[in-house]
Image (tube, rainbow, N blue to C red):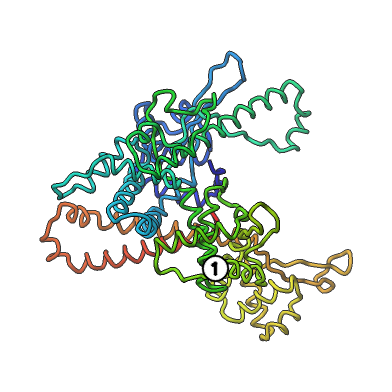
Amino acid sequence: MSEQQPLHPIACQLACLLVEEQLGPLCKEVCDLLLRKETQSLPELSRGTGCSRFELHQALLVLIQHNCVQPYTLVHDEGGSTPAQTVFQPDLRSILYRFRSARCLLHIIDTWGHIDSPATSKIAECIIEGLLENGRLTSDQLCINVAGKLDAGCKNQTPHKSIKRTLCQLISNHYVERAPPADLPMPRVTVHPKALSKRGGMSSSAKAAADQAENVRRLDKVGYGKERYRIPNDLRLDDDSSDCQSASKRQKVNHPSGTVGAELKGAPILWRVSFEEFNRRFRHDACVELIDQAKDGKAAAVAAAILQKTRQFETILKEESSQPTSAGIIKAALEEMKSRDTELPDIPDVAEALRQLEDDDLGLINSAPGGPDGTTYQIDLRFCISLTRLKAMEAIVRQRFGRLGLRIWRVLLLTGQLEQKSIKELALGDQKEVRQLLYGMLKAGFMAVTDIPKTADRAASRTFYTWRVQPESMTEKIGIDTLHAMFNVASRLSVESVLNSELLQQLELENKAIFKTHGQQLGRLKVVRDLLESSLLRLDDTSALFNDF
């Protein structure tokens, strides 16, 4: 499971707006309280929302069903007499990922079409669409849902065996995962060392109990990690395909004696979309696109082959580099990709292409000698994402502050920090205009200024002021600004839906007379909604680059 995203206020407001639009006002009220308090038990939620027990149960069931809230088991004292308590924690990251649903579907359509037949590609699309709409489903519920989508208006019925075979392939490729069980222990809350020193530190017995509790948490988390993409026996027995059988052989692991393993307990296994895997694929696509722009299509194909072979070994989303891979494995991966996609360029000498990439001044691909297969190669993913962010920052600075503003920003990025007079000379600009742009970028959070006093009184007339660019703080600022923009666009889209609610209801009832009486209003509504929705998709791409990758 990925780490919890920091609960920024604008991100919480955006999540509440999305929950209210898709799941209703009651779910929004419960989600808002959880986002403000972070962790709440059932009695605390009842007191905080003022809802009845029945309404609260229904709202929590809907939120858990759609992966907006995750229940945990809170153990007060290990081995003590106090019973364990179920607490609820919001999953802000999963809520905001709902903006990325369309991009996930497009990725499946583009990728799965090269892997298998059109019929299997359509089944995979329907499986992902069904899980995005319903949150989490069992395999039988998923088969019924997908069959209903495929068989609408058709006489032939899609066999459940084909659906389960495609589900096995999606699980093997980590697009679909098991939903985490409700009895996982709470993630450990790290206490600041200063707070411990004020309390006088922890006693030896308390420290031993805390270490024991942490070992239990780690065991359960490792256990869920092993179960996360394991194909259960009912799907494995129904599917006789070679892909599923080979995947099931790779996934033969010993079940830990923890709280996970719903199949062993007899409880139904719930499946959900693995947004972490989709984000990993999008992150890799961004790296391949950067290499394509920096070099050529052949270098991008080599990078895509490396990432395809090493993707399954990544344990976290923000890996700094790919796993080391030999030239032979990369060549085999390129041949496999070429058999699926004939548009890929021909690379007769893979070793020579790797050497050219290694000798490049950018250092996007590194090599290491040794190993049983000879020299190994790996992609510096962190550096690729940093360069992609810098290119996006340049576009934003140029759009807001013009060419001179971009020259000033580049000069400070390359030199570190300079005085205003030196900036004017290097950027070739007017002193007054340079000063206005510097303070404009300082107000926008794109610049930082440092004062260096000559005397102890720090008088302005006897102080040097140097300017500098901080890419890390600028990345955080652009990420927050993007969430602000998404909230504004989503709010406008919600207002348009409220103002035209009667018109939309008539459209749902398929009232054809509405086109004659309100044709112009419908045309305006369609243009506005298309513009706002496309803006949301573009903003979400920027948010993914600066907040998730």
Residue 297: % across, % down: 50, 72
The residue positioned farthest toward the top in the image shown: 81
Count the marks: how many?
A: 1
**Residue occupying the far right of the picture:** 455
Which amino acid lies under the numbered mark 1 shown in the image of this protein?
A: Leu
Horizontal and vertical percent for residue 102? 37, 56
- Residue identified by numbered label 1: 290
Residue 127 lies, with reference to residue 321, above or below; the image says above
- Is 400 on the left-hand or right-hand side of 433? left
Looking at the rendered structure, the secondary structure element under dot 1 is: helix
The residue sitting at 84% across, 67% down in the picture is 453
Q: Quadrant of residue 522?
A: bottom left
Q: Is residue 491 visible?
A: no
Question: Which residue is located at x 72 percent, y 67 percent?
Answer: 449
Q: Position of residue 168 (x, y in %)?
A: 38, 42
Q: Is residue 376 visible?
A: yes
Quarter of the rendering occupied by the C terminus: bottom right
| 337, 468: nearer the viewer | 337
Residue at x-position 67% and y-position 61%: 367
